[in-house]
Image (tube, rainbow, N blue to C red):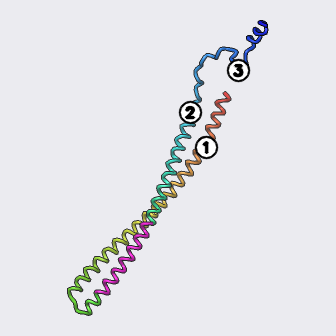
Amino acid sequence: MSGAILATAWIPAAWAQTSSPPAPTAPPTPDPQVQQDRRELRRDRRDLRQDRQDIRQDRRHITQDKQDIRSDRKDIYSDRRDLRQDQKQLQQDRAAGNTEAVKKDRAEIAGDRKDLRGDRRDLYRDRKDLHNDRKDLRADNRDRREDRREVNHDKAKLYRDKKAAGAK
Protein backbone atom coordinates (compact mmCIF):
# COMPACT_ATOMS: atom_id res chain seq x y z
CA MET A 1 0.00 0.00 0.00
CA SER A 2 2.75 2.43 0.82
CA GLY A 3 4.43 1.55 -2.46
CA ALA A 4 1.36 2.67 -4.38
CA ILE A 5 1.30 5.93 -2.51
CA LEU A 6 4.97 6.45 -3.21
CA ALA A 7 4.45 5.74 -6.88
CA THR A 8 1.73 8.33 -7.14
CA ALA A 9 3.89 10.83 -5.29
CA TRP A 10 6.54 10.54 -7.96
CA ILE A 11 4.14 11.08 -10.85
CA PRO A 12 3.65 14.81 -11.26
CA ALA A 13 0.21 16.15 -11.90
CA ALA A 14 -0.51 17.54 -15.33
CA TRP A 15 -0.82 21.09 -14.00
CA ALA A 16 2.25 21.01 -11.81
CA GLN A 17 5.58 22.37 -12.99
CA THR A 18 8.13 19.67 -13.58
CA SER A 19 11.10 22.03 -13.63
CA SER A 20 12.05 25.25 -11.96
CA PRO A 21 10.93 28.45 -13.72
CA PRO A 22 13.42 29.86 -16.18
CA ALA A 23 15.60 32.66 -14.96
CA PRO A 24 14.19 36.06 -15.94
CA THR A 25 15.90 37.47 -18.97
CA ALA A 26 15.87 40.95 -20.36
CA PRO A 27 13.19 41.45 -22.99
CA PRO A 28 14.52 41.36 -26.49
CA THR A 29 15.43 44.78 -27.80
CA PRO A 30 12.84 45.87 -30.33
CA ASP A 31 13.91 46.47 -33.85
CA PRO A 32 14.57 50.22 -34.29
CA GLN A 33 12.86 50.20 -37.68
CA VAL A 34 9.69 48.76 -36.12
CA GLN A 35 9.79 51.46 -33.43
CA GLN A 36 10.18 54.13 -36.08
CA ASP A 37 7.27 52.69 -38.05
CA ARG A 38 5.09 52.74 -34.93
CA ARG A 39 5.96 56.38 -34.28
CA GLU A 40 5.11 57.31 -37.87
CA LEU A 41 1.84 55.41 -37.66
CA ARG A 42 0.86 57.18 -34.42
CA ARG A 43 1.75 60.57 -35.91
CA ASP A 44 -0.24 59.88 -39.07
CA ARG A 45 -3.25 58.71 -37.06
CA ARG A 46 -3.03 61.90 -35.01
CA ASP A 47 -2.96 63.95 -38.23
CA LEU A 48 -5.93 62.01 -39.55
CA ARG A 49 -7.89 62.69 -36.36
CA GLN A 50 -7.07 66.40 -36.59
CA ASP A 51 -8.22 66.48 -40.22
CA ARG A 52 -11.54 64.92 -39.23
CA GLN A 53 -12.00 67.55 -36.52
CA ASP A 54 -11.17 70.29 -39.02
CA ILE A 55 -13.74 68.89 -41.46
CA ARG A 56 -16.43 68.89 -38.77
CA GLN A 57 -15.55 72.48 -37.86
CA ASP A 58 -15.65 73.56 -41.52
CA ARG A 59 -19.09 71.98 -41.93
CA ARG A 60 -20.32 73.88 -38.86
CA HIS A 61 -18.92 77.10 -40.32
CA ILE A 62 -20.63 76.44 -43.66
CA THR A 63 -23.96 75.86 -41.90
CA GLN A 64 -23.53 79.08 -39.91
CA ASP A 65 -22.60 81.02 -43.06
CA LYS A 66 -25.74 79.78 -44.82
CA GLN A 67 -27.86 80.89 -41.87
CA ASP A 68 -26.14 84.28 -41.90
CA ILE A 69 -26.84 84.65 -45.62
CA ARG A 70 -30.52 83.84 -45.08
CA SER A 71 -30.82 86.40 -42.28
CA ASP A 72 -28.96 89.01 -44.39
CA ARG A 73 -31.40 88.45 -47.26
CA LYS A 74 -34.32 88.92 -44.87
CA ASP A 75 -32.75 92.11 -43.56
CA ILE A 76 -32.22 93.42 -47.09
CA TYR A 77 -35.82 92.63 -47.98
CA SER A 78 -37.03 94.43 -44.87
CA ASP A 79 -34.79 97.45 -45.52
CA ARG A 80 -35.97 97.72 -49.12
CA ARG A 81 -39.58 97.58 -47.96
CA ASP A 82 -38.88 100.32 -45.39
CA LEU A 83 -37.18 102.43 -48.06
CA ARG A 84 -40.16 102.08 -50.43
CA GLN A 85 -42.56 103.02 -47.64
CA ASP A 86 -40.49 106.08 -46.73
CA GLN A 87 -40.34 107.16 -50.39
CA LYS A 88 -44.08 106.76 -50.65
CA GLN A 89 -44.53 108.80 -47.46
CA LEU A 90 -42.19 111.47 -48.85
CA GLN A 91 -44.31 111.79 -52.01
CA GLN A 92 -47.47 112.10 -49.93
CA ASP A 93 -45.92 114.74 -47.65
CA ARG A 94 -44.66 116.71 -50.69
CA ALA A 95 -48.10 116.59 -52.24
CA ALA A 96 -49.58 117.81 -48.95
CA GLY A 97 -46.96 120.58 -48.70
CA ASN A 98 -45.75 119.48 -45.26
CA THR A 99 -42.13 120.72 -45.23
CA GLU A 100 -41.27 119.43 -41.73
CA ALA A 101 -42.44 115.93 -42.62
CA VAL A 102 -40.48 116.10 -45.91
CA LYS A 103 -37.25 116.81 -44.00
CA LYS A 104 -37.98 113.97 -41.61
CA ASP A 105 -38.78 111.60 -44.49
CA ARG A 106 -35.53 112.47 -46.27
CA ALA A 107 -33.57 111.72 -43.10
CA GLU A 108 -35.38 108.38 -42.77
CA ILE A 109 -34.67 107.55 -46.40
CA ALA A 110 -30.97 108.32 -45.90
CA GLY A 111 -30.93 106.06 -42.81
CA ASP A 112 -32.72 103.28 -44.68
CA ARG A 113 -30.23 103.49 -47.56
CA LYS A 114 -27.37 103.33 -45.08
CA ASP A 115 -28.93 100.24 -43.43
CA LEU A 116 -29.45 98.66 -46.84
CA ARG A 117 -25.81 99.23 -47.82
CA GLY A 118 -24.65 97.74 -44.52
CA ASP A 119 -26.86 94.67 -44.98
CA ARG A 120 -25.62 94.19 -48.54
CA ARG A 121 -22.06 94.48 -47.31
CA ASP A 122 -22.83 91.81 -44.68
CA LEU A 123 -24.37 89.58 -47.35
CA TYR A 124 -21.32 89.88 -49.60
CA ARG A 125 -19.00 89.20 -46.66
CA ASP A 126 -21.02 86.12 -45.66
CA ARG A 127 -20.98 84.84 -49.24
CA LYS A 128 -17.22 85.27 -49.29
CA ASP A 129 -16.94 83.45 -45.93
CA LEU A 130 -19.06 80.62 -47.31
CA HIS A 131 -16.82 80.35 -50.35
CA ASN A 132 -13.68 80.31 -48.19
CA ASP A 133 -15.14 77.73 -45.79
CA ARG A 134 -16.05 75.46 -48.70
CA LYS A 135 -12.51 75.87 -50.00
CA ASP A 136 -11.15 74.95 -46.54
CA LEU A 137 -13.43 71.91 -46.45
CA ARG A 138 -12.10 70.70 -49.79
CA ALA A 139 -8.51 71.21 -48.63
CA ASP A 140 -9.18 69.36 -45.36
CA ASN A 141 -10.78 66.50 -47.27
CA ARG A 142 -7.69 66.31 -49.46
CA ASP A 143 -5.48 66.27 -46.36
CA ARG A 144 -7.65 63.56 -44.80
CA ARG A 145 -7.32 61.38 -47.89
CA GLU A 146 -3.54 61.88 -47.97
CA ASP A 147 -3.24 61.09 -44.26
CA ARG A 148 -5.45 58.03 -44.67
CA ARG A 149 -3.16 56.84 -47.45
CA GLU A 150 -0.10 57.47 -45.26
CA VAL A 151 -1.66 55.51 -42.39
CA ASN A 152 -2.30 52.59 -44.71
CA HIS A 153 1.27 52.73 -46.06
CA ASP A 154 2.67 52.92 -42.53
CA LYS A 155 0.58 49.93 -41.45
CA ALA A 156 1.92 47.90 -44.35
CA LYS A 157 5.48 49.05 -43.68
CA LEU A 158 5.16 48.18 -39.98
CA TYR A 159 3.83 44.74 -40.88
CA ARG A 160 6.71 44.11 -43.29
CA ASP A 161 9.31 45.30 -40.79
CA LYS A 162 7.82 43.20 -37.99
CA LYS A 163 7.90 40.19 -40.28
CA ALA A 164 11.51 40.92 -41.25
CA ALA A 165 12.50 41.42 -37.58
CA GLY A 166 10.90 38.11 -36.66
CA ALA A 167 12.77 36.30 -39.44
CA LYS A 168 16.17 37.44 -38.13
Q: Which residues are magenta?
A: 67-89
* Three-letter code, disc 1: His
Mark 2 or 3 closer to N-term? 3
Q: Gap between marks 1 and 2, in whole Å?
A: 15 Å
Q: Gap between marks 2 and 3, in whole Å?
A: 38 Å
Q: Residue at x 47, y 62 (%)?
A: 63
Of the two numbered discs 1 and 3 in the rendering, the one whose residue sits closer to the viewer: 3
Residue 15 x, y percent position in the rendering: 70, 20
User: On the picture, is 4 further left or further right than 143?
Assistant: right
Q: Residue at x 26, y 83 (%)?
A: 105
Residue to which mark 1 is pinned = 153
Mark 1 or 3 closer to N-term? 3
* Three-letter code, disc 2: Gln
Nearer to me, 125 or 82? 82
- Check disc 1: other Cα within 10 Å, few if <14, some if 14-19, many if 20+: few
Eyeballing the image, is 36 above or below 108? above
Q: Secondary structure at mark 2?
A: helix
Q: Secondary structure at mark 1?
A: helix
Residue to which mark 3 is pinned = 15
Of the two numbered discs 2 and 3 in the rendering, the one whose residue sits closer to the viewer: 3
Q: Quadrant of residue 120 in the image?
A: bottom left
Residue to which mark 2 is pinned = 35
Verify CB contact (< 8 Å) between mark 2 and mark 3.
Answer: no
